[in-house]
Image (cartoon, helix red, strand yellow):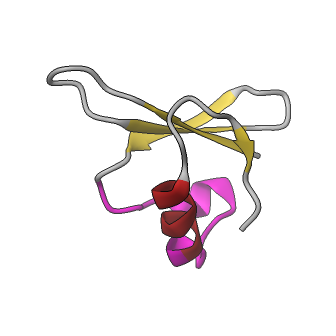
Amino acid sequence: MYIIKVKGKAKIPDYIQLRDEEFVLIAYFRADRPLKDLHRYGLEGKEDALAGVIAGLEFGKLQKLEV
């Protein structure tokens, strides 16, 4: 699974994208909202680790998600 942080403009907020091994979009959520429904992506119980990864992400840099 891969993660990327997308910079918003003006009234559009920053977003996080989760993509599978073939880079197909599987989740898209606001960076400033609490993480929810992570069980859908096999990430339940990893909210704190994922929040830490999101906080350290640079905008526009795709990276492999390892939590």
Q: In this view, does 50 lie to the left or right of 19?
A: left
Residue 62's spot in the image, x, y percent?
A: 68, 35
Q: Residue furthest right?
A: 21
Q: At 69% from the left edge and 61% from the top edge, which residue is drawn?
A: 42
Quarter of the image for residue 9 reads top left
Query: Which residue corresponds to the image point at 63% horizontal and 34% vertical from the top-left?
Result: 61
- Which residues make up the magenta segment? 33-48
Q: In which quarter of the image is residue 53?
A: bottom right
Q: Nearer the viewer, residue 12 or 36?
A: 12
Q: Quadrant of the C terminus?
A: bottom right
Q: In this view, does 32 lie to the left or right of 23?
A: left
Q: Position of residue 33 (x, y in %)?
A: 29, 54
Furthest-left residue in view? 11
Query: What residue occupies the far top of the structure in this picture?
Result: 9
What number of labels is visible? Answer: 0
Q: Which of 56 and 2 is in front in this view?
A: 56
Which residue sits at x=37%, y=47%?
31
Q: Position of residue 32 (x, y in %)?
A: 29, 52
When asked about the image quadrant of residue 10, the answer is: top left
Was residue 40 drawn as part of the magenta stretch in this picture? yes
